[in-house]
Image: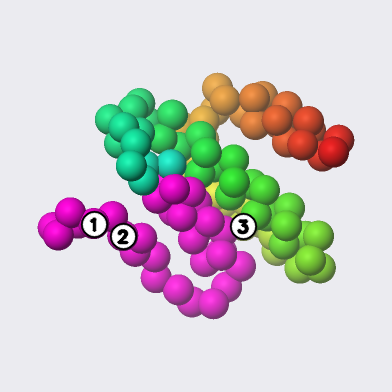
Amino acid sequence: DEDGNMKIFVSTDGTIRFFVTFIHEFIHYISAYKTKFLNSTFSVLEFPSIFFEKLSADFLKNKGYGEDIVNRITFDRTRNNIAVYGSLLPLFNDIKRYISIF
């Protein structure tokens, strides 16, 4: 921002879509905080955010939110992000499977 401080700006409407979007933007904040990630390639900047966005969707399902609506939101987000991580999709899936083992 103009004052030199990083900020997260996400409009809230109290929906599941907001939650997933907030997680995505929050992970950008965490990844870039006091690092050089801001000068990294686009896929490196997006990978952590998209990964945790997907984990947040699983979290919502585990908490009892409707699987249909959560899947619709993640499908929409995936469609929006496909250019960013199309080639990284197998890696996302492998890491997610690995985490679910534990």
- Contact between marks 2 and 1 (CB within 8 A): the answer is yes
* C-alpha separation, residue under disc 2 versus residue under disc 1: 6 Å
The outermost residue toward the left is 2
Q: Amino acid at mark 2?
A: Lys
Which residue, given by chain and number where applicable, does mark 1 sit on? 5
- Asked if 25 appears above or below 63 in the picture, the reply is above
Magenta residue span: 1-30
The tag earlier along the polypeptide, 3 or 1, is 1
Indicate the quadrant where residue 43 lies: top left
Q: Mark 3 and mark 2 in contact? Answer it, CB < 8 Å.
A: no
Q: CA distance from mark 3 to mark 2?
A: 24 Å
Instruction: Determine whether label 3 and label 1 are within 8 Å by CB.
Output: no
Any mark on residue 73, and which? 3
Residue 94: percent from left, percent from top = 73, 27
Residue at image coords 67%, 48%? 55
Outermost bottom residue: 14
Which residue is label 2 attached to? Answer: 7
Asked if the stretch drawn in magenta spans residue 15, the answer is: yes
